[in-house]
Image (cartoon, rainbow, N blue to C red):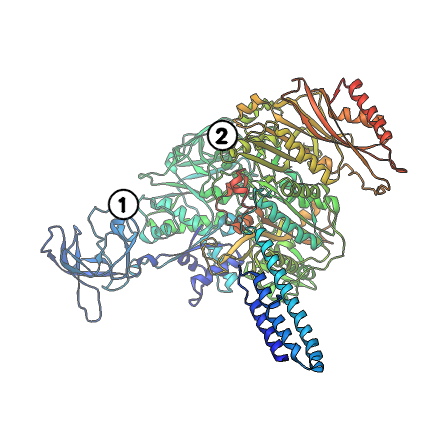
Amino acid sequence: MKSKFEELKKTFEATLADLKDGVDLEEIKNKFLGRKGHLALLMKEMAELADDERKEIGKFANVIKSGMEAGFAKAEAARRVSQVFEGEWLDVTEPIFPAEGRGHLHPITQITEELEDLFASMGFMVLDGPELESDFYNFTALNIPPTHPARDMQDSFYIKGHPDQVMRTQTSPVQVRAMQKYGAPIRVIVPGRCFRNEATDARHEHTFYQLEGLMVDKDINLGHMKGVLEEVAKHLFGPAAKTRLRPKFYPFVEPGMRGEVTCFLCQGQGCRVCKKTGWLEVLGAGLVHPTVLKEGGVDPEKYQGFAFGFGLSRLAMLKYAIDDARLMQGGDERFLKQF
Amino acid sequence: MLLSKKWLQDFVEIPTNLSDQDLAERISACTVEVEEIISQAAPLEKIVVGKILSVNPHPNADKLRVCEVSLGTIDDAPVQIVCGGSNLAEGQKVAVATVGAKVKWHGEGELVEIAPTKLRGVDSFGMICSANEIGLATGQEGEKEIIDLSYLDAEPGISLAEALNLDDTIFDVDNKSLTNRPDLFGHHGMAREISALLSTKFSEFVPKKMSGGKGFSLSVNVEDPELCPRYMGVVIDGLKVAPSPGWLQKRLLAVGMRPINNLVDVTNYVMLEIGQSLHAFDANKLENSGGKEKTVEIIVKRAADKEKFKTLDGQEHELNSDVLMICDGKKSVTMAGIMGGQNSEIDENTTTVFLESANFNSACIRKTSQKLGLRTEASLRYEKSLDPNLSELAMARTIELIFELAPGAKIVSPIVDASNFELNQGPIVLSVKKLNSKLGFEIDIKEAISVLERLGFEVKEKAEELLVKIPSWRATKDISIAEDLIEEIARVYGYEKIVSSLPTAAVVSPIKDPVRELSRKARHILAERFLSIETYNYSFVSPVTLLRMKENLVDYIELANPVSKERPYLRRCLATNLLENVEKNQKFSDSVSLFEVGCRYIAELPGDESGEGKVLPRQDNWLGLAFAKKGNDQPFREVKRALGGLLEELGYSFELKVPEEKVAWGHPSRLAEIFVAEQIVGYLTEVEPGVAADLGLDSRTAVGEINLTRLATLSISEKKYEKIPEFPDVKRDLAFIVARSTEYSVLEKSLQKVSELLHSLELFDIYQGQGIDPDKKSVAIHLTFRAADRTLSSDEVEKEMGKLRTVITDEFSGIIR
């Protein structure tokens, strides 16, 4: 008898488990649990049993019954819930609308902020100075006297009626201004706008951005400079980026060098962008010239340090594969919205 | 600057196992970037000397011939080549491009690889080349001529490059970054540098002793020795102008210099070798004050003001007293150190030359050459501060070469040397401690000394110091302090050997620049909250736009040398360029919202110190925002929302006031000044419609600007906790009609004044239009009443409302709706 009840429960559960959409739940309920359903019929059979046995089977039958009822209730609830949800169906793949868009920061702002944060984490101040600069700070204080041929390297915009004023050709004048203001030891970076008097085309811009760095202390040396520049290169171009230093003349550093990093586009294999050399020139650097320290009011016998300059416009162009320098200052939303 | 490897090898030993690549790499790593290595032979690969054995007619073409050509192969089997050359002959030696060689078809277009082919049905296994097909054209060849190489003493089969001695390698170095190294502007100096890099032997050019001759009297008078520290001259007779010999032409051509004639070529050759420019005059064209025969009289002096002078290139220049001239007894004959004059130029009849080898002041040459826009090979070198000793070296080398080239030549005057210079050759004291401290490691001092000595320095070791004497060729400007020596040691030792390490420094929180901090926050707020787009504009503005904006050009700082005349002025506000941006972007977008952070340049306000007792123009940092949207008639509100919201987000309480003075390009009744802490920090306005039309703006456009430099000095409103109310607020709305010109800020103040229980009010609607008088507006506000100690009864609130209504009706003649 027990096994008959168990059999029934199993069949019932299998029916519920195999429930197809659209099958009427009431029908199943009647068939199994109704007054003339399978369970009721089976229960009727119990009447013929002896008292003791009937009592025992009866108990058992009740357990089976409540089990089946609970199972049914669950199936019923599931059916109800799924019907409600179906009615609330949303297309989750539709785009966000109405389109609100988002605001955009200029690519050079983004690269500048990234570098500012890196240097700030290493204890560097972030400063700027005047863009319309005196000839003194832009050249003379940087060890470039008026007749120095190095002035040719930097075609300058001069100001009408003020031959002693110039649109700064580099962020380096802030080295001297910063040392005058804060003395030594000092750690500072200067991201800023610079100007060179040259005709613009896809590769040349008269207005561009640099990031200057200066660190002066009692024993700062070439090894330190290399170490810091490698950190920056890895931050910008990934942990595999290598850095190498090559001699290059800048009047305000001695020794002076240019820094190159492995081309991140071809991983140093040589490509069009790195002119098949595997290296990209991205910075100038060197140990601060004693004349510059003196102009900054710092005693070159007690202090020494390094300075470097990155071309931010160039970095941004490399990073985003921008092929026309003029877009940076073109004010075209179709360009700016890409960043 | 092009350098010939062979030429360098006249003076320096380059190990045969060192590849050109490795040599270039070493030069790049230690001295100057080699930008390109050019192999003369590379384009002539697989092109060999062939000997024509027979020339036969082509069966199917009149203009083609079928040649049997010996290429000297082991079995000596001739090769059949079909060729259209007009001057083919049996026994002729020719240039044969064999299968696999690359040639330029008829001297034009891309390189084509030679393959076996059939020409009009006849097999051909190569090509007999004309000069322009293999890049050897001189311009003298006939149209269908092939190169006749019969004059060459070369067996068939040897490579053409070898036969023509085109086996040099040319290094192109970036001399723009060599402004500090006048000694490297010739092969001799560069060879010395390379010998130091490679530790190989340098064979210095040692001049033979020169002695003067007789026949001419020569006098040199240097009036301004400061501008001309040395002037050497000599007269040489018995010359005949002719083309230079092949070897000399070849060298000049190899480094990109066009051969002219033996005399000119020799001076150019010496310049490219020694690095010193020389000038040769036709002595017979030089005059002297006394009109005497065989007399050369040279005066070195400043030009007269407004003096006119015609240089070799036919250009006439107007000079002034800053320009140094070489004069004969009667006239100017050369612009010193820059270019000779037409009046004393060597021509085909020249037999006697006056040869000048001099040293001029670098600043003077640089200034003149810049001013006149005349950059020459000579000025390029002089402006770098040449070693005056080179004058003598170059003179000696020139005389040597002239004698070699013109056997009849003889010196017919004394060798005059007007010399007035002193070089500071040190010694420099270099402390070993300082050297190590700057390098960051302890260098083997023997190695350091060796580097210096290889470069030509004389070093004495003394206790912990090196006493270093500077060689004359590095003493003019380049090397003067210990740091200069450290660079020499470090670069030749090798920057790649420097071990990188990170510096240790005191833990100090870096000082923050408040303006930068503020501008960074502001950028993010405008982009992230107001979905505006950041742009960067030039600092330069266009007079066309300025005039359209009714600005006064005289207020503007002007560039002395703008790149283009279009933008010669420095901006006095960010709006100028932002409005140009709006105009441009309207073509592509219905709604434009752009902002920029940058500085204004204000001449009449004092800015930073110039470092020489003066002050620079004020250059405060400003933030500017422009907004326009098709169909939006009040963009002013959007700009106000953004800039006001920005100030609030930054923590500033602000106030907008109607200014007394109008802005020329601003809408006179849609213009406000922004105040923070009683100080004006900016403005906002709609562009006056007339101006907007002139600027080509399609939609109404508003602009606002905030002075971040000033804002950063003002304190933000401090946040203070206010007790959360214990008793409930009571809210009411109030709508009324008042005159359109009623200022809300005034109204608000009056309302707040009369009711102590009024906790706050919030404007939620302003309506003008249908149903409202044109000179009236409907205003609706939410009112919140609150008491700290009790729940307000409706009677109390009603009483307050009554007071407010009275203010509106009585003070503002309003009508409650």
In the rendered structure, which amino acid carries the disc numbered 2?
Leu
Q: Sequence order check: which comes first, mark 2 or mark 1?
A: 1
The residue tagged with tag 2: helix, strand or loop? loop
Asked if badges 2 and 1 are on one and the same chain, I answer yes
* Amino acid carrying mark 1 in the image: Gly
- Viewer-proximal residue, B265 or A201? A201
Question: What mark, if any, has residue B759 been given in the picture?
Answer: none
**In the image, is B717 to the left or to the right of A188?**
right
Q: Is residue B256 above or below residue B555?
A: below
Numbered disc total = 2
What is the crowding at mark 2: few (fewer than 14 residues within 10 Å), some, or many (at least 20)? many
Q: Which residue is mark 2?
A: B319
Q: Position of residue A210 (x, y in %)?
A: 60, 46
Q: CA distance from mark 2 to mark 1?
A: 39 Å
Quarter of the figure that contains the C terminus of chain B: top right
Name the foreground residue: B257 vs B562: B562
**Residue B742 percent location from the top left of the image:** 73, 21
x and y percent of residue B386 in the render?
52, 47
Is residue B471 rendered to the left or right of residue A202?
right
> In front: A149, or B764?
B764
Q: Nearer the viewer, mark 2 or mark 1?
A: 1
Task: Name the residue carrying label 1.
Answer: B139
Q: Chain of mark 1?
A: B
Q: Quadrant of residue B737?
A: top right
B522 and A183: which is toward the camera: B522
Q: Is residue A339 left or right of residue B155?
A: right
